[in-house]
């Protein structure tokens, strides 16, 4: 204590609370003191804290060491106030076999070798949370590129060096895009992306030294599919978003984990979509959105902002509600206040809170300041209560220009549950031969809306680009009016979204199954993979859970009619029989 070598009189460990209490032998004077601790530990084997990893190379086993601290495992490596609000600076020194690469958050400032062992000292980190500290040791080789003054390096095992190029491209694009988006340059002199043989998460955003599961970072130029490349790009970009949202500005406590993860999820898709628009990234996002929509319709769901006390509570927050529902809410708010105002609010938030900790209201305050709109009221509805609404739309006039919107909580079993939201609704509609958008805030159980413009409205869809986290229901006239052709009208993501809504309503018993089946037939000209997967998955579920055996023959013919053209487009050739078609549908949906 204070350099005097004063040992504690006793130590009290509390395994449940994951704490140690040091009791000193004499009282301390009021004021500031410095406590120095020495400790020892062992390499773990369960991918938590500092742990050992193994990989095979040319018939031999090679040993590696990595860390994974989020959310509460820094305490497994060193004694600390291991909570996100207790930020600190770190000066790290590593010693290991001279033949190995040693990495940490910051660049090395010195290196010495003695008796076959290497000691590397790293520069002091900026102020940051304990869970972002990281170290790595192993036989790793680099590929480096200078991007806007930052050394961006992908580290791999030597045998994987040929698979690093795509990740480097994705990281370069993400770093350039995010420097511009935040109008706040990346704060460290280097950014390492490290392929880890054994890693419990897909990736981890350690500041300046990001760790990835091998499959989430590496791309074999000859074997990797476009879908897998897109997934790598999304993961790389997600972790680089965290270098600002999560690392530079961090939530005060884990009940606001969504501030980190929802924002990184949403913005990663946005950045990747602008880089590779041919990938139709938002279609992928919509497919990902269906899981949380299903979970959030159950009685057992939770609010995004939920109480988190223990480590188990905190780990439970890392789910689709935090990541994808949260990301959709941000996208919904951006659509309501406009992209320009949203970006301005985010920049204000980042500059105001850099190197600090925040709560949800800090973000809403910045967005309200930038937009002049009631962002906080909207967001608190969506974060503070579980579930989501079914927004029903009906036409009040023959020209479909006057509509009634209603909302009630959607539940998987059709049971009535309390709940009301301030719902930003983006109404896409066609009038005068042009597809237009009208944005309204549905903050009551029912509202009437008049669409801008003159003349009859050809069709209306109340969730443009599937930006909202809610189900939609259309009256018979509005559903029948939706165009079935691919050359105009609904976007691909809206067609798959419509089918998802009709399917969910049919399963809940709030809409006839015939409406869903008729829509499957209507959109059978859409032979793209997302619509095909949606159709195949629904057919398999119908076959397994709803089909009367007496109708098996008719159902097989119906499925063949829907899926046959799609399989031919995908190169399967002529189907031999209906049973083969159903089998392929099952395989596709698995």
Image (cartoon, rainbow, N blue to C red):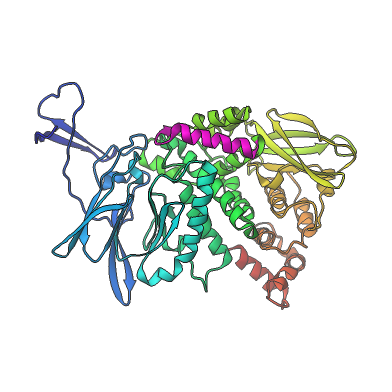
Residue in front for this viewpoint, 254 or 178 = 178
**Which of the 4 image quadrants contains residue 356?**
top left
Outermost front residue? 149
Q: Is residue 290 above or below residue 162?
A: above
Residue 8 location (% of width, % of height): 12, 34
Residue 16 location (% of width, % of height): 29, 39
Answer whether residue 346 is magenta in the image: yes
Q: Residue at x 45, y 61 (%)?
A: 217
**Which of the 4 image quadrants contains residue 62?**
bottom left
Q: Residue at x 72, y 76 (%)?
A: 575
Residue in front for this viewpoint, 191 or 436 = 191
Q: Is residue 569 above or below residue 83?
A: below
State which region is magenta. Answer: 338-358
Residue in front for this viewpoint, 532 or 589 = 532
**Relative to 196, 280 lies left or right:** right
Answer whether residue 16 is magenta in the image: no
Can the viewer see residue 320 in this picture? no
Residue 275 location (% of width, % of height): 59, 56
Which image quarter holds the C terminus? Answer: bottom right
Can the viewer see residue 23 in this picture? yes
Residue in front for this viewpoint, 8 or 107 = 107
Q: Is residue 460 above or below residue 447?
A: below
**Which SS does the magenta portion mostly show?**
helix
Q: Is residue 417 above or below residue 243?
A: above
**Relative to 481, 75 lies left or right:** left
Outermost top residue? 30
Which image quarter holds the N terminus? Answer: top left
**Relative to 545, 27 lies left or right:** left
**Which of the 4 image quadrants contains residue 249?**
top left
Q: Residue at x 51, y 29 (%)?
A: 361
């Amino acid at each position: 204590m204070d350099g005097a070598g004063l040992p504690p009189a006793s130590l009290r460990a509390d395994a449940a609370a994951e704490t140690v209490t040091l009791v000193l032998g004499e009282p301390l004077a009021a004021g500031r003191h410095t406590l120095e601790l020495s400790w020892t530990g062992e390499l773990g084997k369960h991918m938590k804290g500092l742990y050992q990893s193994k990989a095979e190379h040319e018939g031999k086993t090679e040993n590696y060491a990595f860390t994974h601290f989020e959310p509460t495992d820094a305490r497994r490596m060193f004694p600390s106030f291991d909570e996100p609000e207790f930020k600190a600076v770190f000066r790290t020194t590593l010693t290991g076999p001279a033949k190995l690469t040693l990495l940490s958050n910051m660049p090395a400032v010195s290196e010495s070798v003695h008796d076959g062992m290497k000691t590397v000292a790293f520069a002091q980190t900026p102020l940051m949370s304990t869970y972002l500290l990281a170290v790595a040791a192993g036989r790793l080789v680099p590929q480096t590129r200078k991007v806007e003054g930052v050394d961006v390096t992908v580290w791999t095992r030597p045998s994987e060096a040929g698979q690093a190029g795509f990740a480097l491209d994705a990281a370069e694009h993400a770093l350039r895009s995010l420097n511009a988006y935040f109008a706040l340059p990346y704060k460290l002199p280097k950014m390492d992306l490290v392929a880890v043989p054994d890693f419990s998460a897909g990736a981890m955003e350690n500041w300046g030294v990001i760790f990835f599961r091998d499959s989430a970072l590496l791309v074999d130029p000859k074997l990797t599919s476009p879908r897998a490349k897109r997934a790598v790009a999304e993961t790389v970009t997600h972790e680089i978003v965290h270098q600002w949202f999560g690392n530079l500005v961090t939530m005060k406590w884990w009940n606001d984990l969504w501030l980190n993860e929802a924002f990184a999820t949403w913005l990663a898709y946005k950045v990747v979509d602008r880089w590779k628009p041919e990938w139709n990234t938002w279609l992928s996002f919509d497919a990902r959105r269906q899981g949380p929509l299903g979970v959030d319709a159950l009685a057992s769901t939770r609010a995004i902002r939920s109480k988190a006390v223990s480590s188990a509570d905190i780990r439970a927050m890392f789910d689709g509600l935090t990541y994808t529902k949260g990301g959709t809410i941000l996208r919904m708010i951006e659509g309501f206040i406009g992209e320009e105002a949203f970006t301005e609010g985010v920049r204000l938030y980042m500059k105001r809170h850099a190197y600090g900790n925040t709560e949800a209201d800090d973000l809403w305050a910045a967005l309200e300041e930038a937009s002049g709109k009631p962002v906080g009221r909207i967001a608190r509805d969506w974060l503070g209560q579980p579930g989501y609404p079914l927004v029903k739309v009906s036409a009040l006039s023959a020209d479909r220009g006057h509509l009634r919107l209603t909302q009630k909580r959607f539940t998987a079993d059709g049971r009535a549950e309390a709940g009301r939201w301030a719902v930003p609704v983006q109404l896409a509609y066609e009038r005068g031969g042009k597809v237009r958008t009208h944005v309204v805030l549905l903050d009551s159980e029912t509202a009437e809306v008049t669409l801008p413009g003159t003349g009859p409205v050809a069709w209306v869809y109340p969730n443009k680009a599937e930006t909202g986290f809610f189900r939609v229901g259309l009256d018979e006239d509005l559903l029948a009016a939706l165009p079935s052709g691919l050359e105009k009208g609904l976007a691909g993501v809206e067609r798959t979204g419509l089918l998802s809504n009709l399917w969910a309503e049919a399963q809940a018993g709030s809409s006839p199954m015939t409406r869903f089946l008729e829509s499957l037939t209507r959109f059978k000209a859409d032979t793209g993979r997302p619509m095909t997967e949606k159709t195949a998955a629904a057919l398999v579920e119908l076959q397994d859970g709803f089909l009367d055996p007496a109708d098996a023959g008719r159902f097989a013919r119906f499925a063949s009619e829907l899926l046959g053209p799609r399989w031919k487009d995908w190169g399967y050739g002529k189907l031999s029989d209906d049973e083969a078609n159903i089998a392929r549908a099952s395989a596709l949906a698995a």
